[in-house]
Amino acid sequence: MAGTPESRVEAPPAKDGAAQDFIHAAILEDNRSGRFQGRVHTRFPPEPNGYLHIGHAKAICIDFGMAAEFGGQCNLRFDDTNPTKEDQEYVDSIIADVTWLGFDWEDRLFFASDYFEPTYAWAEDLIRQGKAYVCDLPPDEVSRLRGTLTEPGQDSPCRERSVEENLDLFRRMRAGEFPDGSRTLRAKIDMASPNLNLRDPVMYRILHSEHHRQGTAWCIYPMYDWAHGLEDSIEGITHSLCSLEYENHRPLYDWFLDQLGIYHPRQIEFARLSLTYTVMSKRKLLKLVQDGRVTGWDDPRMPTLSGLRRRGYTPEAIRTFCETIGITKFSGITDVALLEHCLRDDLNRRAPRYMGVLHPLKVVIENLPEGTVEWLDAVNNPENPDAGTRRVPLTREIYIEADDFREEPSAQFFRLAPGREVRLRWAYFITCREAVKDAQGNVVELRCTYDPATRGGNAPDGRKVKGTIHWVSAPQALDAEVRLYDRLFLQENPEDVAAGQDFMSTLNPDSLAVLRGCKLEPALGDVGAGVTVQFERLGYFCVDCRDSRPEARVFNRTVPLRDTWAKIEKKEAGKPAAKATSPKPAVEAAPAGVALIGIEDFSRLALKTAKVLAAERVPAADKLLRLQIDLGSEQRQIVAGIALFYTPEQIVGKTVVVVSNLQPAVIRGVESNGMLLAAKTKKDLRLVTVDGDLPPGATIG
């Protein structure tokens, strides 16, 4: 495997302890039963028809992570069964992205096209068993006769062809005798099945198109539902981990393997990732590229891994994010602010600090002699003492941010103003003496003086200043272009649009602002392409790996310093508890410390029965379980502090009582919509459960 990333995920020892989620639980169960002789072998099977995005990162972390945690192996396999959409460019980008994330498939790089011959042979085997047939119906007619969720399908007129005729036609399909779309090979299962995927699904279609690896050797190509279980079987996969949309396809996966009587892996589904302000469909991402709305798949505004890498994201931050959101069996939308929070947390520890001025305003320090260059020590990263220090030049002329000066400051403005003293970061106190203006009345230069006794930013006489500003030396500054990236879409759900519109109508016209003539401290000239640093007081910025050159430096803003997610968590944690109304006189006194309430207060609680559909532990939170519950009219996610008293297995299937009209809360980064009722002592906790046949959503009163 080519390339070695700086960040490599090390495989921990095999696990045999408590399950963290339903996939862990399934693997532990299989290991205890000996189903796969204690082996854990997974695979990541991308289709090379586009670049990987942040949603794929979740799947990659699960596939490779599960194998690593249990001391197993994970294959990288390309599902290259559609030659009309696949390209070697996408293969190369996927290999680069998985490597960058820190995962290693060793010598197990495979392609579905490597298995075309055995896959074809198994198809003939099903034909000989009378369980597959060649169908002449066009695609729209196949779809029409498939039926609906409430009506059974209708048999194809070709369904009862003889084995001999089907073998002959299928071989002629392979030989290229028929045009595209004229015939398919279909499995013969059950046209009345309640699962539409079992209504004689297509196994092969005719495509006279050159394949990126096989050339023109084949003109029939297997469908994913037919091929991927066979590929798993060939490779000895134990746990075929898929996104949730394949849950209804699992019976078909099992049917094919059972009819052929070959090695049978276990398919397990998990919910895919959805992010606010983001689209994940490769088809829609391709449209953005083809329509020129972005500069390419690696545009830093794109959610692709190559785009995130170019923007300055680290693989460690993405892996932490995927671990934080956990593995669920139910769909939901994750706030993109959580991803940005994980990135800031990672960069805060590792990114070196520098000073850069994006909107320069010249300052002349009048009492510093011309030609003077004083070198000052600046800390590279206060979070990492091992990062050391660097030397920063101070000269008579410097640049500061234009926003750091106000001619008529407000009461809350503590930076530079006429007659006001501020601290230059790592340097001295300076005082503004004069603001020089141009003919239009714009401030173009400040005349200041500095106090030589305040070197390092502290005054010997103990006087304090409220403002500290960053700066760069004017004669030694590096010129740079800085690209300020913002969210690509204006609304949380870009696909929630009015009739007649599509997701493109929600594009943010201000998602990119390009600043030229920015001034950077000279040490930034040694920072290589793709390296992310912090511009003090401004944010994190990355040297653009495509456009930046020594004579024309380009920096991309990775993320601002302001942490939206931390503010959300702080707001949730700081909400005052609801105040109890003043107790009314009662016949008997309330127990000590308990306020009495009226019946009208109790009636405000909407108590309903709910069935627990799924449960799993919240990562890095020993006391919390994340539950998916059925409230009858809807399903919800609830986070409950019951993990010390119930395992996920113990609570699934129970009918519990839920306070259903609470405002949503964010608990350890996970949204919770409701609260379970429980009885608690100092040492124990028991959920309030409901016996009998009371359905979900019943009102408790």
Image (cartoon, helix red, strand yellow):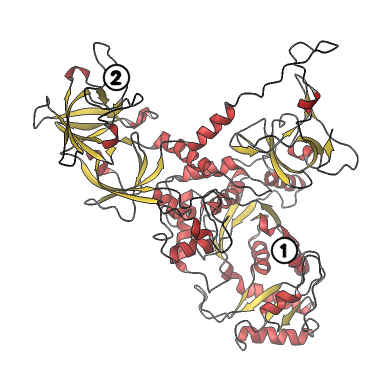
- Judged left or right of residue 319, residue 553 is left
Instruction: Name the element at disc 1.
Output: helix
- Residue at left 67%, top 78%? 139
* Residue 666 seen: yes
Q: Read off the residue under disc 2.
A: 465
Choose between 581 and 221: the one closer to the eye: 581
Q: In which quadrant of the rendered view does residue 14 lie?
A: top right
Q: Position of residue 620 (x, y in %)?
A: 60, 34
Residue 602, how many percent across, how many down?
A: 78, 27
Front residue of this view, candidates 701 and 261: 701
Location of the C terminus (image quadrant): top right
Q: Is residue 322 above or below residue 579?
A: below
Left or right of 82? Residue 228 is: right
Q: Residues within 10 Å of mark 1 (few under 14, many from 20)?
A: many
Other-residue count near label 2 (Cα within 10 Å), few / some / many at <14 / 14–19 / ≥20: some
Image mark count: 2
Disc 2 marks a residue whose amino acid type is: Val
Q: Looking at the rendering, which quadrant does residue 141 occupy?
A: bottom right
Residue at 58% from the left image edge and 28% from the top image edge: 573
Question: Which residue, as the protein is rendered here, is positioned at the far front?
Answer: 440
Indicate which disc, 1 or 2, sits on the residue closer to the N terminus.
1
The spot of residue 532 in percent (x, y) is 36, 43
Does residue 91 appear anywhere in the picture? no
In the foreground, 183 or 584: 584
Residue beneath disc 1: 253
